[in-house]
Amino acid sequence: MISLWYVIDHVRNGAMWRDLRQMESSQDLSWREIAAPRLEELLTWSQLHVPAHRALEHSHSLDILDLLETLPIMKREDLINDPGKYTSDVLPRSVHWKCTGGSTGVLLHVLQDSRYGAANSAGSYLFFKWVGWKPTDRIQKIWGSYAEVLGDHPTVKRRLLNWLYGQPQLDANALRAGDFDRYVDVIDRTRPEIILSYVNAAESLAEYINISGRRLSYTPRGVVTAAGTLFPDWRRNIERAFGCPVFNRYASDEAGCIACARGADALYVNPSTHIVEVVDADGQRIAHGTGRILVTVLNNLSMPLIRYDTGDYATIDSAESLYPQHGWQRLESVDGRELTMLRGPDGSRFSPLLFTHLIDVVQNKGFISQYQIVQRGLEKYTIRLKLWPGLSPEEPRIRLSLDGFRHDMLAVLGSATVIEFAFVDQVEAFPSGKVPFCIVRFDEEPAHASAHD
């Protein structure tokens, strides 16, 4: 039986369903056949309407890879320092700003519109179909729920949408004592065919299931993980706990759903929405190994992201696997997106993404250039903040926002938690050059600490 949400969504989001049908019917085509006309449209539009791209020259006769190589790499800093330069002079009414701190802690605002949204949602459902999803299936989300973690109840609108769409949500930002049992009970009661989860929340829940000996009374069709690196041992733990395959997904707030695995194999890039390149430190494409990800978003004309450096890393087997003559682009793994769960004194787990939302959206009033969270003890945190030039940490609006941030975090982490702010010129980088927005480095490792004490 077709669910109510399916009927309503076909009326509300007809463009998304049309995009999905087109993507499904194109799966036997090569990535070049699908992506080339979309890239041509994007570049033609950008030359006409985007200041930064008006000087670009491209030949219609060039191969898609040769064409991309003639274009400059777009850095995160470019969008931050001069967003107007990358904004179209023709914007639809549906345009809106998307705020993200990414995996680097550098705050970024990107314009997105309904055309982009429809294509991105269609790509997400295409990936669900690879798991075996059907319109009658229920999807259980273990995802960020910022209002609930701060003690608020879901709004009536949120509850209604969860019911209509068959996608109830469990919070992935804070897993406290008792939550693990409750989450297993909810999953057992609702029996979703697919579970969509932050990768670190799925691993934490799987660890609890495996250690406690609890078992689900049924077998889901698949677990889809995102928002972090899926390590091989994490995959094995999740598969053991839920008794089903794990499908890893790569996405970002500014670029959308980019790639997904079809099981335990590589991740395949959706050529209807994205083109991916992997380059070395000098911006040259690599033939194999690990390099930085450049993504071209094919459906966002409001702020085109062309050869955009995501700050993430990927591993490829060969140039032929990433740029094949037939089939779709393939990434062996996405690396460098580790989001270590933060620990509380009672065995609670907290996702670093909780901090990113509070800093990016709730408390940042335009004064934070970059931030980095360091957990130094079970109840001790240092928040490193790099302010925009010319600003002082003593300004009243800055102190007020930081007081609000501390208040919100104490409500989550506990009133005994010590939160210090350190104003820095540069945040810490790893030897590889990667700048993590979250570091777990205890001053003293707590005695007898375990995952679920």
Image (cartoon, rainbow, N blue to C red):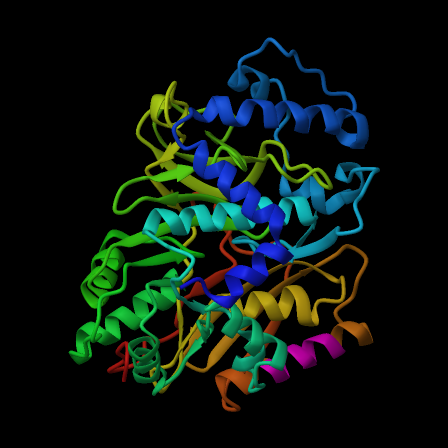
**Foreground residue among 401 and 64:** 64
| Quarter holding residue 72 | top right
Q: Position of residue 191 (x, y in %)?
A: 31, 72
Q: Position of residue 143 (x, y in %)?
A: 46, 68
Q: Is residue 304 magenta?
A: no
Quarter holding the N terminus is bottom left
| Quarter holding residue 134 | bottom left
**In the image, what residue occupies the spot 57% across and 59% down?**
9
**In the image, what residue occupies the spot 80% across and 43% down?**
91
The residue positioned farthest toward the front in the image shown: 1
Please indicate whether residue 408 sits to the left or right of residue 251 in the image.
Answer: right
**Foreground residue among 292 and 396:** 292
**Foreground residue among 206 and 257:** 257
The chief SS type of the magenta part is helix
The residue positioned farthest toward the left in the image shown: 213
Q: Position of residue 76 (x, y in %)?
A: 63, 43
- Count of marks, rendered view: 0
**In the image, what residue occupies the spot 76% across and 24% down?**
47
Q: Position of residue 236 (x, y in %)?
A: 20, 57
Q: Which segment did they paint magenta? A: 400-408
| Residue 236, visible in the rendered structure | yes
Examine the rendered structure and indicate whether residue 79 appears above or below residue 164: above
**In the image, what residue occupies the spot 37% across and 53% down?**
229
Examine the rendered structure and indicate whether residue 113 appears above or below residue 57: below
Examine the rendered structure and indicate whether residue 23 appears above or below residue 445: above
The residue positioned farthest toward the top in the image shown: 61
Please indicate whether residue 201 sits to the left or right of residue 168 in the image.
Answer: left
Quarter holding the C terminus is bottom left
| Residue 336, visible in the rendered structure | no
Examine the rendered structure and indicate whether residue 65 appears above or below residue 139: above
The residue positioned farthest toward the right in the image shown: 89
